[in-house]
Amino acid sequence: MTDRTEQKPSETAKDATAENAAADIDANGRIDWHSPQMLARLRRRHAANRRMKFIGLAAILLAAGLLSILVGSLLKSGLPAFRQTFITLEFDLKPELVKPDNMRRGKWRKIVKEGLLRALPEDMRNNRKLKRKVLKIVSRSAPYALRDHVMKNPHLVGRIIPFDVLASDPYDQFNKGLLPEYVGAGERKRPNPKLGGPEVVRAFRVLKEQKRVSLPFNWGLFFNADSRLPEAAGLAGAIVGSFLTLLVTFLISFPTGILAAIYLEEFAPKNRFTDFVEININNLAAVPSVVFGLLGLSLFIGFFGVPRSTPLVGGMVLSLMTLPTIIIATRAALKAVPPSLREAALGVGASHHQMVFHHVLPVAMPGILTGAIIGMAQALGETAPLLLVGMNAFIPDISNMGITEPATALPTQIYSWADSPERGFVSRTAAAILVLLGFLLAMNTLAIWLRQRYSTKW
Amino acid sequence: MTMTKNRDITRQAATTNDVASPVCGGECKFITRDVNVFYGEKQAIFDVSLDIPDRSVMALIGPSGCGKSTYLRCLNRMNDLIDICRVEGTFLLDGEDIYSGAIDPVLLRARVGMVFQKPNPFPKSIYENVAYGPRIHGLAKNKADLDEIVETSLRKAALWEEVKDRLDAPGTGLSGGQQQRLCIARAIATRPEVILMDEPASALDPIATARIEELIDELKENYCIVIVTHSMQQAARVSDRTAFFHLGRLIEEGPTEQIFTAPREKQTQDYITGRYG
């Protein structure tokens, strides 16, 4: 007994917290649970507990704070783009201006200008300065929108019709209170040149008083194709392009990835070669995506001659990137299937193949789908490889999009918009980021739902 | 390479000597000779030779890690699944060497069914659990046939009355004892000749255990049953013959009554009186 009490301190001397470990053990080997050393040690242990909790909480709060700053700033600059200023005007479709036999050569700008002037009071209408600049109020796309509307409804020719036209970007911003009427301060204060001069602003005010200016939800953001004019630009081309690209990615990487994972996990012999394959799959998952873009550029486009800028080549590149994610997730899901289930299947005489496809795969499916969806979500947000294969085409018309037609995708669209100098693209970019985040959130929610819904209850 | 070579040698020996069994004459279901099992470099079973009579219960007892489960799993080649496991020796099922390639392991496992320590029904319906084996082996001509197999198997496993109204309910929703009986029904459904049970009652409460033991008693009318158990009372209650394993060797084998009342070996005596294990 005495031997032990003497030995103990030397044994545990290296352990800093147990320096006086044996001090509260008396000669009979009884432990004094209330000795000061014991209580101090206990306090230290509880303090370490609290410290850990505090640090963890602080980390979470920091992360949540940064995230809310990000989302907050996106919302602040992006939300205005979800509404768009329209101006309701009456247009006199005089046949001599419309040119009914060839409407494409009609004087649409003049019709729009007259429509604007009609709405204004007599004195303004005759102001020559205003006459020259009044078109600044409406979008440069307005004449084309009116033309397309009349071409679809030829019976309108000769009538006076009400029609909503887009306000120009500066007046859209002005209407939302994002563009000041004057710039500069003090002596240098002057009317904002972007608005075209005080008389144009006065004319806009008159239109507003006449309740011709409205600010409805901006469906154009989702249903319009891209445009050089921020007020007319929409994400339709990018959404369709992203969808087609992801479709190609899914069709290539999902079956390939799952079959590769099943083979490696269930059928392949365990040897140096399969170890080598496994290590390299894990390495592939860590390769920067831009490298896959270069590979796609030189191999798919340069060597195999896949048409560039298309969802086909974009999807092929992204599937290279998604494959390792799907393989790793699938292998993890297969590994997680309890061995007792495999034994049960083999025990009744199922062949290896039957065991895998009848029993293991259904149980692993929720995990596999989750991994696949997360891989696809990653691919949806990927920009660099798409830029390298040229998938940032300018798509002003979405009527003939296909997997072998030039296209753009959501992240590359954001990239191009962020690069545009027009003020209206600032909020359009933020809005596009919000749309992308919305899609990502939807995909991850789907993954969680699938996991909850189809996971096997034991 | 070495594995097949060794097996060839032992098989030759077995066939030339035309192994005759001292215990069960012509009624032996399994005859095993000179069984050695290795996990990598480590040998788990040493020179075990054991004969298992038909239509009776053979209990394998012994302390943990003595190789009884390993031996049991050799009988339907479940050890094939473990990469590093190597089996040597002769295993004759009705005179056929099960490791020779004459019997496909897939068909062997239909003939030699297995019930595991932890109930492991498929996460499918009760019906599917039982019907799966017959279906993959093509034992049923049509749906009515399959329905009949499912019913008979569940009846034999004494589960039919409890589940006949909810055959579509998931098998995993049953209680532990019911799950184990479902696993027995599943094993019976492929009309096996032998049923291997690896501690079938160790995860069950005493009442469920009693039901399983009753069931074993009924099943031995038609099947050869080999049961691994940690409970010596259970071995004494259900088995006709008992084999005592220790450190990978078969120490003693004989009629259960003799093993428990008058063991020949001192080690057996020590184990059944609880001196170690």
Image: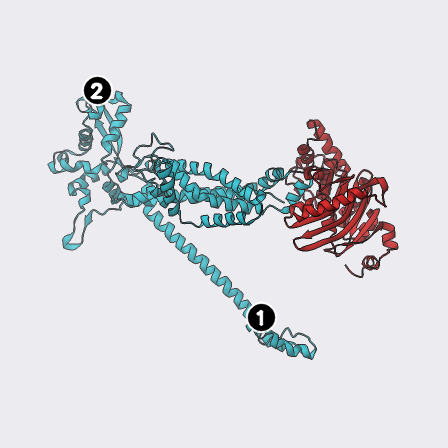
Chain colours: A cyan, B red
Q: Residue at x 69, y 76 (%)?
A: A29
Horizontal and vertical percent position of residue B177: 73, 45
Q: Alpha carbon of mark 1 to alpha carbon of mark 2: how far?
A: 95 Å
Residue B227, disc: none
* Quadrant showing the N terminus of chain A: bottom right
User: Mark 1, residues whose alpha carbon is within 10 Å: few (<14), some, or many (≥20)?
Assistant: few
Q: Is residue A114 above or below residue B93?
A: above
Regarding residue B166, the answer to whether it shows in the image is no
Kindly identify the amino acid type of the residue bearing the numbered disc 1: Leu
Residue at the spot of label 1: A42
Mark 2 Cα shell of 10 Å, populated few (<14), some (14-19), many (≥20): few
Nearer to us in this view, B202 or A276? A276
Position of residue B60 relative to residue A159, above or below, is below
Residue B44 screen position, x and y as percent: 71, 54
Closer to us: A260 or A64: A260
Q: Chain of mark 2?
A: A
Q: Is residue A420 visible?
A: yes
Q: Which residue is mark 2?
A: A101
Position of residue A125 in the picture relative to residue A38 (left or right): left
